[in-house]
Image: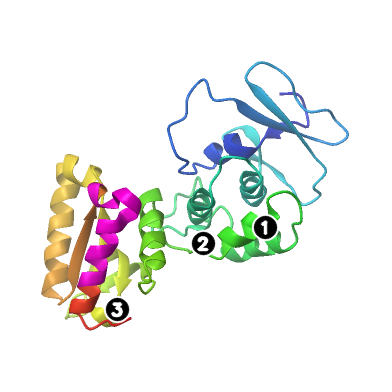
Amino acid sequence: MSDGQFFSHTTAARMWLAPLAGYFSALEPLHVMSRSPERAARGRGIVGHETNDPRLIVVDRFGFPVADPASTWLQLAATPGVSLDELIIVADHLVLVPEYVNPADPRPFVTLDELRMRVAGYSGRGARRAREALEHVRVGSESRRETQLRLAIVRAGLPEPELNQVIYSKAGERIGRADKVYRRYKLIVEYDGQQHRTDSVQYDRDMTRTEEFIRADWFPLKIRKEQMRNGAAEATRRVERALRERGWTP
């Protein structure tokens, strides 16, 4: 890239470690943006873009110039083929405040308030989709599947859970964080990813944590990958049944 050019769109999103659908391939084109009046980059495997957006900030990311997180997200909103859910998933990732922060890579990459302000002042391509997606963005989803499950739960007409809340024992001791919490109904909903079964150490920790949840009178409901198929119909059915059994009514 020449001076003044920087990564944008899906390339920038990957630089921000966004959980986009599919794995990165060496055949995936690189999106490179230039500020007007400089002409868009050209070359094999390069998709060139131009911008005159004064709010876009170029930042250093792993030694490369990259569009800032909010601008990257707005670029995705204007990208054909990027679904509404994909936008929500990426935004959840960008605004996440993790329990343990890596000092070398501080989070969140952008706060939810900052993203709202950026979207409010944006009127370019994809503005309507960005506003629609932003309504469903929440702080607390730590993975692609967690966001997908949350969206499925809400779209099924079920109450929206709290995200990644700390659960305590009856003695007031910390047990750990739970993906989705219905405090009123003492219900915990968690996505059980494959890594929990293949990593024996993590599996043992999860089993112990689950036992402690039960001792504290919480009901931990595990959702598996297979139950996320067909629009997560089986997953939402199990969540609804658990809620009803604990007193929830529509």
Residue 104 shown left or right of residue 201 in the figure: right
* Residue sitting farthest toward the right: 37
x, y percent for residue 182: 30, 75
| Magenta segment main secondary structure | helix
Residue that numbered label 1 is attached to:
128
Q: Which residues are magenta?
A: 226-241
- Magenta region includes residue 234: yes
Q: Is residue 135 above or below residue 17?
A: below
x, y percent for residue 245: 18, 78
168 or 245, which is in the foreground?
245
Numbered disc 2: secondary structure:
loop
186 or 200, which is in the foreground?
186
For label 2, the crowd category at 10 Å Cα-Cα, with few meaning under 14, some 14 to 19 and many 20 or more, is many
Mark closest to the chain's N terminus, 3 or 1: 1
- Quarter where residue 162 is shown: bottom left
**For the residues marked 3 and 1, what is the alpha-carbon distance in whole angstroms?**
34 Å
- Quarter where residue 218 is shown: bottom left
Q: Quadrant of the N terminus?
A: top right
Q: Is residue 143 above or below residue 59?
A: below
**For the residues marked 2 and 1, what is the alpha-carbon distance in whole angstroms?**
15 Å
* Residue sitting farthest toward the top: 44
x, y percent for residue 50: 78, 35
Residue that numbered label 3 is attached to:
183
Q: Which mark is residue 137?
A: 2
For label 3, the crowd category at 10 Å Cα-Cα, with few meaning under 14, some 14 to 19 and many 20 or more, is few
Numbered disc 1: secondary structure:
helix
Mark closest to the chain's N terminus, 2 or 1: 1
Residue 61 is at least partly visible in this image: no
Mark closest to the chain's N terminus, 3 or 2: 2
